[in-house]
Structures are given as C-alpha cells and as structure tokens.
Image (cartoon, helix red, strand yellow):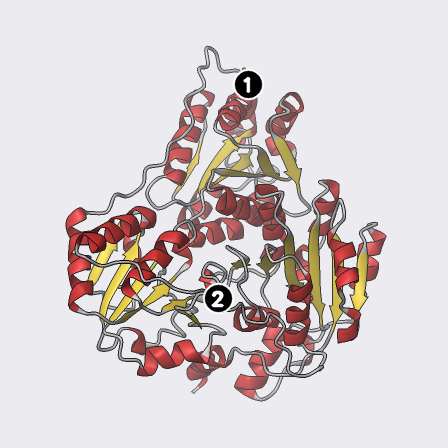
Amino acid sequence: MKAARTVLEYLKNSGVQYIFGIPAGSVNAFFDELNDMSELTPIVTKHEGAASYMAAAYAKYTNHLSVCIGCSGPGGTNLVTGAANAMREHLPVLFLTGAVPVNTIGLNASQELDAEPIFRPVTKYSVTVKESKDLLTEIVKASEIALSGVPGPVHIAIPIDVQHETVPNVEIPAPPKGTAIVPELDTIKRVAEELLARRSGYILVGQGVRNSVEQLLELAEILNWPIITTPQAKGYIPEDHPLLVGVFGFAGHEAASQLIADGDGQVLFIVGSSLGETATNNYNLNLTKNRFSIQMDFDQSVFNRKYEIDLPVLGDIHSSLLLLIEELRAKGLARTSYEVIETKEIYEADTGEYNTKNVLLTIQKYLPASTRYAIDIGEFMSYVIHHMKVVDYDTFNINVHFGAMGSGIGSAIGSKLAEPERPVACITGDGCFFMHGMEILTAKEYNLPILFIVMNNARLGMVYHGHALQFKRTHPSFEQHPTNISAMASAMDIPSFQVTELQDLNQDMLHNLINLKGPAVLEVVLTDNNTPPMGDRVKFLSSFGK
C-alpha cells in the first residue's frame, strides 16, 4: 500500500469525509488514491486560503478533525493564514503540504520551501516526514495532538517520493481520541464559595461556550446574573433571554458598556474568552476594576495576560460548568424560573432610509430564523454585531479577532458541508469578494445552496470610515472601480439579484434565492456614509498617532 493511501485509510476510519484543497504535482499521490475511495470527497477550491477557512469552519461545526491540503511552496504558504486562524479559534485542522523529493532538498527544486518552521508558530505541531515508514505514525500523533487538551491545527510536510513509496504490512491504527482537560474539583468548590460570598456579578461569555450554552444559561439563572457576550460569541445567547444585556467590545452595546463602567457587580465571571482587544473594548480596565475576577477556560495561556485574574479555572468548559452547577445546587441554590420575554422585533428600522442597518435587518426578517450567517470582514460586520438579532442557536460565525478578509466566504461553505440541513448565508463585501469571491463557483460545483450577500460600495469601507474618523481624510486609493458583481455571478451561471433600494428586498425574491439546488448572489449596491458603530476601535487606533 502506498504511504499516501495509508494516510487516507486512517483518515477515512477516523470519520473524515472531506479533504479541502487544490491538487498539484507535489500532492498527486493523495489525489490519485482518492479515485478509489468514494468515502472521501475532495473539495477542490479556487484558492488554498479559502480551503483553509472551509476546513476551519467544518472543524468548528462538526467538532471533528478536518483536513486541508496544498502543494509545496506557494500552496503551503497560502494555507498559513488559515492555520493562524484555526490556531486562534482552537480548531483541530490537519494541514498536509507536499514537499520536493528528499534527494533534491536544498538544490533549488521547483516550488521548494521548508514549510515546517513556517507553520510552527501557527500550529500545535509541525513536522517534515522524510521516510515512508514514519508517515502514518506522525499522522496519528499529529491528529491526537490536534484534538487533545487545547484543540488546534497541526501540520505535516510530505515529500513527493515519500507519498509514493510502498509501505508493507500496514495495520491502520484506531481513530484518534482527544483528551479533555479535567478541572480540579477543589478549584470548582472554591469558585462556588466565592460566588456565594459575593452575591452580585456579571458573566462575560466568549466563544469558548460554543458547545456549553445550555449549561451557561443554567448557571446564569442559578446566580440570577446579567450576561454580556463578546463580539465573537454573538449568536450563542438568545435575544429573548431576560438576562442578556448585549455585546461588550467591538461594535458592542451601550447597555453592556454602562454595566461594566458603572454597575455595582462584585464579580466578573469570564467563561471561554481570552480577553483580547476586540472582546474587552480595547483592554478596558473597568472590566475587573474593584471586582473579584474568575476566568474559566481550557487554555492556561489566557490567564493573567492583560488582566490579573483572582481565580483561574483550568479545564474543559463543559465539564467545569456542570461541576460548578452541581456544587451550587449542593449548597442550596436553585435555578430561577424565567418567563421568556416576547421576541424583540427583528426589523428595527425607524426610517425608510436605504442604509446598511436597514438592509441587514430586512434581509434577516425574511430569511429563516435558523439561518447561520458567516460574517466577513468589513464595515458591515460592525452593523451585524450591533444590530442583527440572535433568534436561534449558534447563528453567527464572526471572525473579528483574527480578521482575514474573505474568510467568511470559505467559512460559509465549510459550515454548509458540516450541517447540510441548516440554511447558510454569507455576508461579505466587494473588497472581500475580490479576494475569495470565486469560491461561489466552488459552492456551485458541489451544489451547496448558500446565499452570498455582497455589500458592494466600491470601496474598502472599514478602512475608509476608519481613516475618516481618525485622520479626517481618506486616500483616493480606498475607492474601487464600480463592478457589477451580479453580472459576474451570471457569467458563472449562478442566480443573482441586484438591490439598489430598500424596496427591492422582499420575501418572494429572497425565498426564490434560498430555495435552489446551489448558491445564489444577492448584490446590495449601497454607499453608506453613516458612521458605523465602531467608534471605540477608532479611539484605540487614534491613541497611537499622538
């Protein structure tokens, strides 16, 4: 059996269904073997960067190992941004890159690059395998590292000749098993004691609660404490929950900021947030000022970075919450009974103005409540965070902390493959579209019914507004040549509709675009000169120009 086939057999037995990437000479053994393995489907993309975002989203929404592949040299370097993204989001992605034949290393072979050290800072493990007998062992090792402890990406570079070599007497190992970090019971008991000693506080929720929302809500209801989310965690706490205050951080809500600045809560209980810049409103010191701070996370490195934490709780978040709830119950606390408040009207437009806010709220009004929105990077992102509503579980994929333009497009595809029955819409901009927009053709080739909403303002909107606010002027190069993106979609035989006024958005039109056997493009031609809700971000950047 070829060494490449042993890898694919192991991945197949481990439950892997898709391999994201682009075929090339230095990985041809893998793609050739896929001809005889119907259980594995190659998702051939238009750019390796987009493949890495797809793989990351797939890992995120399946809670499973995901696989991404690229050729040696440029293919590998195109994957690095996605690896860095997966590292920030703690997503188990196995990155495979080709490499030149072992006997040509150092001889300036075609597309030669030592990828191992390049991937090392943005993965949990990076290695080059130079002997076929070691390949499967390294794949197994890397897969287990990716899934264990703090999940994250791993990378293996494989020379062309190693892939093609025959490996005798192969026994395919058992699928990888991730090991969770078990919280210390004494620490959980101390948390319960501290909470009882201080009966008022706030819960700050980060994206780490993704698979523990039910437990988080139970804890909040036992304590009867307000819930604040980070921008990255928007979508996890339902809008109609009485304890939800709103988003704190980038594009957040005034109510959340006022609670942190002026509220008398004695405790800040942080669950699943690394307390980065966008989550803390530019490292706002009011978060922990005069408050006892408790931080629960599976990543030990997040404790005591910018903020001094009084009581760090290291362990799997799901297990930690369950143990804490059990401890609080044992001490006599009971869950508060809440009547869910009436769902707030999704469409909050107070005028008929054709602007970004009204467009997004109108679209959300007509799309299914269960729609998951993959949000790209641009001025529209701040409107999504600030104005769009959470009407179903896990409805927003917002990558504000790493912020790669175009990542939302690939993320939408990965999300749809992970949960085929769930409606998916990508909200992107023309700037992002020009980076990875050709992936709409990938969606067409795999019959993925995704609605790609392109906010087309013929400029780099976030950059434009940021400079206008910070420097009171903008450079002409921020403007782009107006392009008919609907016509581009039509050229690929993808259904599209162009919006030029608010009245163009209606239920019938959107219904037709989402009930297809493949993707559709909704182009919103709109130059919105209103100031996006991102002023604190600008204040932070402005502090460096003084």
What residue does disc 2 label? 240
Residue at the spot 51% in from the left edge and 69% down from the top edge: 342
Taking the image as shown, residue 148 lies to the left or right of residue 72, namely left
For numbered disc 1, what is the local secondary structure? loop
Residue 60, can we see it?
A: yes
98 in relation to 318, above or below: above
Label 2 is placed on what type of residue? Asp
Q: Which image quadrant: the C terminus? A: bottom left
Q: Which of 381 and 545 is in front in this view?
A: 381
For numbered disc 2, what is the local secondary structure? loop
At label 2, counting other C-alpha atoms closer than 10 Å, the crowd grade (few under 14, some 14-19, many 20 or more) is some
Residue 272, can we see it?
A: no
Which quadrant of the figure has residue 163? top right
What residue does disc 1 label? 2
Pointers 2 and 1 in contact (CB under 8 A)? no
Taking the image as shown, residue 509 lies to the left or right of residue 135, namely right
Dot in front, 2 or 1: 2
What x and y, as percent, mark residue 81?
A: 52, 53
Label 1 is placed on what type of residue? Lys
